[in-house]
Amino acid sequence: MVVDGEIVNYLVQFVYLQLLDLLTTIAFLLNGIHEGNPLVRWALNAAPTPWGGLLGVKVLAVLLGLYCWRLGKQRLLARVNFLFAILVAWNLVALIAGSVLAAKSI
Protein backbone atom coordinates (compact mmCIF):
# COMPACT_ATOMS: atom_id res chain seq x y z
CA MET A 1 0.00 0.00 0.00
CA VAL A 2 1.44 3.36 -1.04
CA VAL A 3 0.72 6.12 1.49
CA ASP A 4 0.56 9.79 0.59
CA GLY A 5 2.98 11.59 2.90
CA GLU A 6 0.78 14.67 3.25
CA ILE A 7 -2.21 12.78 4.63
CA VAL A 8 0.09 10.90 7.02
CA ASN A 9 1.29 14.29 8.29
CA TYR A 10 -2.33 15.33 8.85
CA LEU A 11 -2.95 12.11 10.78
CA VAL A 12 0.14 12.64 12.96
CA GLN A 13 -0.96 16.23 13.61
CA PHE A 14 -4.44 15.00 14.48
CA VAL A 15 -3.13 12.50 17.03
CA TYR A 16 -0.81 15.14 18.51
CA LEU A 17 -3.66 17.64 18.83
CA GLN A 18 -5.81 14.96 20.51
CA LEU A 19 -3.02 14.43 23.05
CA LEU A 20 -2.75 18.18 23.68
CA ASP A 21 -6.53 18.41 24.08
CA LEU A 22 -6.43 15.49 26.53
CA LEU A 23 -3.74 17.22 28.59
CA THR A 24 -5.50 20.59 28.64
CA THR A 25 -8.78 18.90 29.59
CA ILE A 26 -7.03 17.13 32.47
CA ALA A 27 -5.59 20.48 33.57
CA PHE A 28 -9.09 22.00 33.50
CA LEU A 29 -10.55 19.15 35.53
CA LEU A 30 -7.75 19.30 38.10
CA ASN A 31 -8.45 23.02 38.52
CA GLY A 32 -12.18 22.49 39.06
CA ILE A 33 -13.29 23.68 35.62
CA HIS A 34 -16.15 21.67 34.13
CA GLU A 35 -15.99 20.14 30.65
CA GLY A 36 -17.72 22.29 28.04
CA ASN A 37 -18.38 19.60 25.43
CA PRO A 38 -21.66 17.84 26.31
CA LEU A 39 -20.57 14.51 24.77
CA VAL A 40 -17.31 14.48 26.68
CA ARG A 41 -19.12 15.58 29.85
CA TRP A 42 -21.51 12.63 29.41
CA ALA A 43 -18.55 10.24 28.97
CA LEU A 44 -16.91 11.63 32.11
CA ASN A 45 -20.08 10.93 34.09
CA ALA A 46 -21.01 7.60 32.46
CA ALA A 47 -17.62 5.90 32.78
CA PRO A 48 -16.53 4.18 36.01
CA THR A 49 -13.92 6.95 36.40
CA PRO A 50 -13.80 10.37 34.73
CA TRP A 51 -10.27 9.64 33.48
CA GLY A 52 -11.48 6.45 31.85
CA GLY A 53 -14.30 8.34 30.14
CA LEU A 54 -11.92 11.01 28.88
CA LEU A 55 -9.44 8.44 27.63
CA GLY A 56 -12.26 6.54 25.91
CA VAL A 57 -13.37 9.69 24.08
CA LYS A 58 -9.81 10.34 22.90
CA VAL A 59 -9.34 6.73 21.75
CA LEU A 60 -12.58 7.05 19.78
CA ALA A 61 -11.35 10.33 18.27
CA VAL A 62 -8.07 8.73 17.17
CA LEU A 63 -10.00 5.82 15.65
CA LEU A 64 -12.10 8.32 13.68
CA GLY A 65 -8.88 10.00 12.52
CA LEU A 66 -7.55 6.63 11.37
CA TYR A 67 -10.82 6.01 9.54
CA CYS A 68 -10.48 9.35 7.72
CA TRP A 69 -6.88 8.50 6.87
CA ARG A 70 -7.89 5.08 5.50
CA LEU A 71 -10.54 6.68 3.30
CA GLY A 72 -8.17 9.41 2.11
CA LYS A 73 -10.20 12.23 3.67
CA GLN A 74 -7.26 14.63 3.65
CA ARG A 75 -9.31 17.82 3.52
CA LEU A 76 -11.49 16.68 6.44
CA LEU A 77 -8.43 15.88 8.57
CA ALA A 78 -6.91 19.27 7.71
CA ARG A 79 -10.09 21.10 8.74
CA VAL A 80 -10.46 19.14 11.97
CA ASN A 81 -6.80 19.81 12.77
CA PHE A 82 -7.39 23.52 12.30
CA LEU A 83 -10.35 23.43 14.68
CA PHE A 84 -8.49 21.41 17.32
CA ALA A 85 -5.47 23.72 17.06
CA ILE A 86 -7.77 26.67 17.84
CA LEU A 87 -9.38 24.70 20.68
CA VAL A 88 -6.03 23.78 22.26
CA ALA A 89 -4.80 27.38 21.95
CA TRP A 90 -8.03 28.62 23.58
CA ASN A 91 -7.64 26.07 26.39
CA LEU A 92 -4.06 27.21 27.05
CA VAL A 93 -5.03 30.89 27.08
CA ALA A 94 -7.90 30.12 29.49
CA LEU A 95 -5.60 28.14 31.79
CA ILE A 96 -2.99 30.89 31.82
CA ALA A 97 -5.58 33.62 32.38
CA GLY A 98 -7.16 31.61 35.19
CA SER A 99 -3.77 31.09 36.83
CA VAL A 100 -2.96 34.80 36.61
CA LEU A 101 -6.30 35.73 38.17
CA ALA A 102 -5.87 33.12 40.91
CA ALA A 103 -2.36 34.41 41.67
CA LYS A 104 -3.62 38.00 41.94
CA SER A 105 -6.32 37.02 44.43
CA ILE A 106 -3.79 35.53 46.86
Image (spheres, rainbow, N blue to C red):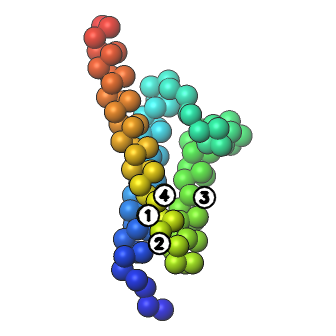
Label 2, label 4: how many angstroms apart (C-alpha)? Answer: 10 Å
Picture disc at residue 78: 1
Point 30% across, 7% down: residue = 106
**Viewer-nearest of discs 3 and 1:** 1
- Residue at 41% x, 55% y is 82
> Which amino acid, by three-letter code, is at mark 1?
Ala
**Residue at mark 2 to residue at mark 3: CA–CA distance:** 19 Å
Q: Mark 2–mark 3 contact, CB under 8 Å?
A: no
Between marks 4 and 1, how big is the CA–CA gap? 6 Å
Q: Residues within 10 Å of mark 2 (few under 14, many from 20)?
A: some
Residue 80: assigned label: 4
Query: Closer to the N terminus: mark 3 or mark 4?
Result: 3
Q: Are marks 2 and 4 in contact (CB under 8 Å)?
A: no
Marks 3 and 1 close (CB-CB < 8 Å): no
Q: Residue furthest right?
A: 46
Crowd rating for badge 1 (residues with CA inside 10 Å; few <14, some 14–19, many 20+):
some
Label 2: which residue?
74
- At label 3, counting other C-alpha atoms closer than 10 Å, the crowd grade (few under 14, some 14-19, many 20 or more) is few
Front-lying residue, 61 or 77: 77
Residue that badge 3 annotates:
60
Query: Which amino acid type is marked by label 3?
Result: Leu
